[in-house]
Amino acid sequence: MTPPAHTPPPTRIPLTDATLGHLVTVAAVQTPAGAPEWAGQLCDLGFVPGEPVRLMARGLGGDPLVVRVGHSTYALRRAEAACVWVVSEAAPRG
Amino acid sequence: MAEAVIHVHPAGPVLALVGNPNCGKTALFNALTGSRQKVANYAGVTVERKEGRLLSAAGKVLRLLDLPGTYSLHPRSPDERVTRDVLYGQAPGEKRPDLVVCVVDATNLRRNLKLVLAVRRLGLPAVVVLNMADLAEARGLVIDTQALSRELGLPVVRTVATRGTGTEALRALLDDTRTWQGHGPVPTPAALAAATPDDDAGDHHTVSQILQRLGLDAALPQLASDRIDRVVLHPVAGPVLLAVLLFLIFQAVFAWAAAPMEAIKAGTEAVGAAITATLPGHGLWRWVSSLLVDGVIAGAGGVLVFLPQIVILFFFILVLEESGYLPRAAFLLDRLMGSVGLSGRSFIPLLSSFACAIPGIMAARTIGNPRDRLVTIMVAPLMTCSARLPVYALVIGAFIPQRRVVGGFELQGLVLFLLYASGIAGALVVAWVLKRLTAHGQVRALMMELPAYHLPTVRNIALGLWQRVRIFLRRVGGVILVLTVALWALASFPTPPEGATRAAIEYSAAGQLGHLLSHLFEPIGFNWQISIALVPGLAAREVLVSSLGTVYALSGTASDAATALVPIISSTWSLATALSLLAWFVFAPQCLSTLAAVRRETGGWAMPAAMALYLFVLAYAASFITYRLALAAGLG
C-alpha cells in the first residue's frame, strides 16, 4: 500500500519573486527597519493578508514592479514589494 | 486678558469633497461648480486649495472644498496632511466642513470604502457618491446602491462625474435636512489621534464583509487597460513609445506655438507703437511713454509671448494625466530618475520646466518626499526653458553656419539639440551630486497608483488649462511686472548728460553696473555690452536680446533688433565669446522671476539664494572652460 501523498505547506515568497501574471495571496507584510511607515501605507493601498495579488510587469532590471492587488494597480519599488510575502501554492507531488 | 484669534469665514455651509486619488473627485468638483472656482493656497503650506460655489436643487448657495486625494486619514505627504487637518478641524484658518462628500470609485470599492469608514468615524454628516458607475457596469459590477447605503448607514448617490449624471440627485439630497445631521457624538481631536492600526485592520475586515454581502468580492478579470499596459510598460517598447511621444510633444510645442507667438509679438508691438504715437513726446510724458513701452510692454510682454508654448505644453500634460498615461511614464523613468536621487514623480515638474521653470517649480508640490521635492525644484531651471530660445536663436543665427553635417542633420539644429542635452545632463549631474551629499542611503518610497486608462474629457482639460493660464498670468502681472519696471528704472536713470555720444543706457545705473560687471566677466569673454545687457536680463532671460538691442543703440521694434543684431555681433564678437555666452545660458542663473517662484514655494530665502549661487558658479565655470578652450583652439 503506498503512503498518502504528502502535500508540502504552501511556500512563502516575497512578491518580487512571484511569477508574472500568476494569482497569489498576501500572507504577511513585513517592513524593513529603515522605513517603519511602509507597513501602514501598504495596508492602506490594500496589501492585507488574504488579498489576491498579481504581479503584472517588471521594469528594466526588476525595479520598479507593477502589482495588482484587489482591484487596484500600483507601481512599487523593489524594496517595497519585497515587504509583501505571498503564498504561492506549491504543486502537490503525486 | 488672553487674546484669541477669531477666523471670520464667509457665510454658507461648507462641504468637503474627500476621496482616494484618481476617483474622479476633480471631475465631480468641476461638474458641480462649473467655472465658479477659486484656486489658492492653504495657510502655511504650498498645497493647492480649491473652493467653488455650488447651488443645491432649491437654489441654496453652498461652498464646496475639493480636498487633496488621500488613501486614509494617516497622511503620507503635505497634501494628505491638509485633508486630514481640515477634516479634523485643525487646519489653520479653515472652518471644519459641515458635510463631507465621500467620493468613491465604483470600480475600486475595496480600497475606497476604507476611507469612507474612517470618515464616518469622524461623526460629521456625510454622503457617499458612487462615481464611475458607468465603468463599473461595463465591467459587470452590479452595485445595489440601496443595499450599500444600508450597510454604510449613509446616503449613496450614483454618479458619472464626467457626464454630469447624478449631480441633480446629489443637489436634491443637499436640500434634505436629514443629510446634514451627524451620526452620534463627534470625537475630540485627542480621541481621533489615538486611532490605532487595529482600526485599519477592522476597517478592512468590515469592508470585506460588506462586499461579500453585496456579492462584489470576486477577483477582477483582464481589463482593456492591462492589454494596453502590456505594450506601454514593456521593458523595450515602453521607453521607445515614451521617447516618440516626448519628441512629438516638443515638435508640436514649437510648431503650433509659432503663429500665436508671432501674433502676440505683433500685438504688443502695435500697442507700443500706438502709445508712442498718441502720447506727447516731451517732458514727463516721454518718461511715461518710455515706462509703458520699454518697461512694461517690452518686459512683461516679453514673458507673455511664451504663453502659447505654455498652453500647448500643459494641454499635452493634462491629456496625458487625464488619460492615465503619466504614472506609466513616471514608472518607465523611475530607474533613471532614481539613479540620480530624483523620484519618478519629478518627471512632470521637469517636463513643465521646458516651457517655463515657474509652473514646473509649482508642480513639484505633488512630490511627497520633501528632499526629492527640493532637489526637483533646484534642478528645474536647468531644463532649457523657452526664454533661452531667443538668445540661442540669436547666437546660433550669427555664428553657426547653415550647413549639413554627417547624417544629413542641420548643423544649427544640432547645436540647438546639444544645448538642450547639456541642460538635461547638467540637471542629472547636479541631482546626482545632491544625492551623494544628502540622501545618505535613504530608501525612497514609490507606491504610485496606475489608474485604468480612460478617454480625457474636453471639459476637464479646458478647465485645467484655464486655471493654469490664470495662475501664470497672475505671476506675470505680479512679480514679473514689478521686476521689469524696477529694471527699466535702473536702465533709464540717471539720464545721459548733454552732448553724450554713447548709447543712453551706458550712463544709467544699469549701465554703470554693467561696466563694473564687465571686469568680472572679462575672463569669460563677455564684453561690456553683454555685461550691461545681462542686468535687465535679470527680469527674464530673453530680455537679454532686447537689452542688447538697446545697448547697441538700435531703434525700432524687438524683432527688428534681433535681425539687425545678427550682423553686428557676428562681426564684433569672437566665436569664443559667442560659445561662452551659450555655455552661460545653459545655466543662466540670472532669472529673478524663477528665484521669486522658488522663494514662494520653499517659504524662505535660503533656497533661492542657494540656487542663484550654484547656478552662478556652474555658469561661470562652464563659460570659463568654454572660452579658454575656444581661445586655445584659435577661435578668439
Image (spheres, coloured by chain):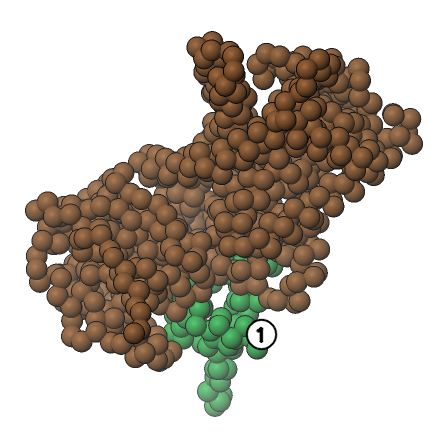
Q: Is residue B351 above or below residue A49?
A: above
- In the rendered structure, which amino acid carries the disc numbered 1? Gly
In the displayed structure image, the side of residue B221 where residue B599 appears, left or right: right
Chain A palette colour: green
Q: Which residue is mark 1?
A: A34
Q: Is residue B42 above or below residue B465?
A: below
Taking the spot 89% from the left edge, 30% from the top edge, the residue there is B631
Taking the spot 82% from the left edge, 38% from the top edge, the residue there is B624
Q: Position of residue B275 (x, y in %)?
A: 46, 14
- Chain assigned brown: B
Taking the spot 24% from the left edge, 76% from the top edge, the residue there is B187
In the displayed structure image, the side of residue B434 where residue B213 appears, left or right: left
One can see residue B401 in this view: no
Q: Position of residue A70 (x, y in %)?
A: 37, 63
Q: Quadrant of residue B584?
A: top right
In the displayed structure image, the side of residue B623 where residue B479 appears, left or right: left
Q: Position of residue B627 (x, y in %)?
A: 83, 33
